[in-house]
Amino acid sequence: MLFKSLYFIFLIFFYFSLSSIVFVITAVYSQDNNGLSQKNKTPIDHVIVISQGRRSFDNYFGSYEGVNGFQMNVGIPINPFQFSPSFQNFTISLSFNSNTSNVGKESFLINKGGIGKESPGNNLNFGIWLNEKEHLTGGFETKEGKDFFVASKNKYRDNNWHHVILTYNKSVLKLYVDKKLQAEKITEGEIPDDNNLPFIRLGANFLKQNNFYTGSIDNILVWNRSLNANEISSFFTNKDIPAGSIVKVGLNTTNMKYENKNAALNFNGTNYFDLKVIPDITEGLIEPFHLKNTKTPNLKYGPQVYDKSYNYGFMDGFIFAQNDNKVTPNDIPNKYNHTIVMGYYNNSEIGPYWSLASNFVLADNFFSSTRQTDLTNNLHLFSAEEGNFKKYVPKAGLSINSTVLDLLEKKRITWKIYVENYDSSLNYTNEDESSKRYLTLNPILGIPRFVENSTLNGRIQDLSNYFHDIKNNFPSLSYIILPDSQESSPKDILKGQESVVSLIISLMQSKHWKNSLFILTYSGSGGWYDHVPPAFNSEYERGFRVPTLFISPYSHEGVVDSTFYDTLSILKFLEYNFNLKSLNIKDSLSNNILAAFDFDKPPRSSSESLANLLEHYQNNITNKKPVVKENIFFIFNIYLLVLVCIILFLLFLLFIIKKEIVHL
């Protein structure tokens, strides 16, 4: 009787133990909890976003084959602003073919300096335009706002080509059209206003961007001297170009250069081009050079540095912006070499990143969202609100109405922020310097509700949980912040690269890889040289290009994506992928990153990409962090459950035996 009872009890507990184990296994492995309230618009269930600090595109990928990288013989001067000539005397020559659609409207062919404010420094330095009556007009304004203009007798909106010359010798202003002197005016020594801006606008009025021209302009030449009658006659008759023309450099467009090569510029009534005014410089230019040291001095960055570097879109003020206006060519050998901004890395230093580019998608037309501080640019990974933020989070915190995390919360879609060496005390309520700097990288902890709400705050965790969650319950959206492993100078880029690559390797080795997208981007250029000016936007100024990689089994393989993107394009994709509404007009108008993927094909295996990445990882990275191989938490739970079952079984067995003995 005793043994029958024991056998029956053993079967019950065995069944209970086995059922419990199966339940735990099912619970753990079925918790691929995307939390999606509705089906994604793409196969992507998990998006991981990381911003790794301040690096320009040219600094990391300027020499990568197939991208819009360094151009042949590109170089910039140490001080581009020293080449702004005075135009007390001037001559302008150009050919034009005006469309009749301009009838009844004043339209500018060429002008410099005038922005219509009628105050010193804002008056017209010189210009040529067609007035409302179709007469060709030219002239200048003095610093006091006095006008000196001459106008043609004939009309020139006739769809025919004409050659015009406007010349001034500090005494007489003359207008020539098609070899004939059309008008002249004595000025009695008056001189044009001079604001020293280093460019001339074609096809529109100056900074006001109105009075647009429709037609074509060609053969533009400008001198900061007057041409005499013999030079003008020879120019008209024999095409002998007088010496000393100072317009030699290109237009302010991303992919176009203009050097008087008889390529007419076409204007549609809404566009314009800017010509830079410099002499023909052939010496003293600093070209990009290969950096072999992965740790460099900290560069100056921020709005003022970016404005000087940008230099009205000619992208040649980078060295000057680091110098505080004091450096000269003789200063180049100094201990702190300001020309370091022209340095770049290649496959020798950032081999794993180049390997990722050759296996996935590298965006070569991706811009930081603003030229403001790190705080603003990093915040745009979460919110499309512009805000008037300074360098640090204010004492009262950030007043941000909505973030993409709020939108996910409403739909019960899971998200987390993983932070390297996370210290929960570093939030907007902590006023020490380390906290202020930390919040520029993790601005979510500068928003009061994410600090005070325990549920929201609980989703901000230490980076170690990433390696655990990727084997278990991985969130739909993850942000990763590496305060100690950023790649901004003066930090060693190898340490940051090591951390990023270990995260990607762990993702590739996980079950979630087949439905994931890892986005590696940067908050700003950090002062490093980049030759591509941001596209013009009348509402706000974008920052410079930054490296960005889209790593997914659905990414095109080894493709350079030249679609125009900025930081808000990431928000646009998150909203599209998880069926969220737009945060505001800015992210709704941004370009989605869908061109980087092919969702019609099955996901690519990670094996080949992983092998290539591991090879670079082993060869280029030292002191590697171990990639998590086992789910320790899962194993621990299984063993604990089995142990509890065994103990309960033994206790119950002991109770039965004791009862039987007493019965006997």
Image (cartoon, rainbow, N blue to C red):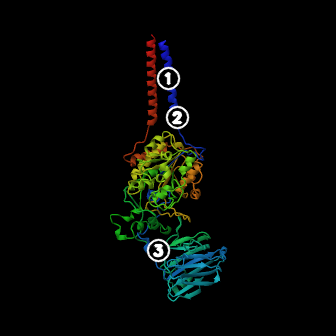
- 581 vs 258: above or below: above
Q: Are marks 3 and 1 in contact (CB under 8 Å)?
A: no
Label 1 is placed on what type of residue? Phe
547 over 475 or under it: above or below:
below
The numbered dot on residue 188 is: none
Left or right: 330, with 90 as reference point:
left
Residue that numbered label 3 is attached to: 278
Real-space Cα separation, disc 3 to disc 1, in angstroms: 88 Å
- What residue is shown with label 2? 27
Q: CA distance from mark 2 to mark 1?
A: 20 Å
**Crowd around label 3: few <14 · some 14–19 · many ≥20 (10 Å):** some
Toward the viewer: 391 or 217? Answer: 391
Quadrant of residue 391 in the image? bottom left
For residue 563, which quarter of the picture?
Answer: bottom right
Real-space CA distance between mark 2 and mark 3, rounded to the nearest whole angstrom: 70 Å
Q: Position of residue 604 (x, y in %)?
A: 53, 44
Q: Position of residue 166 (x, y in %)?
A: 55, 82
Three-letter amino acid code of the residue under disc 2: Ala
Q: Which residue in the rendered view is the most extreme toward the left? A: 335
Q: Is residue 487 visible?
A: no
Q: Position of residue 508 (x, y in %)?
A: 48, 43
Local packing at callout 1 (Cα closer than 10 Å; few below 14, some 14-19, many 20+) is: some
Q: Which of label 2 and label 3 is nearer to you?
A: 2
Circles 2 and 1 in contact, beta carbons < 8 Å: no
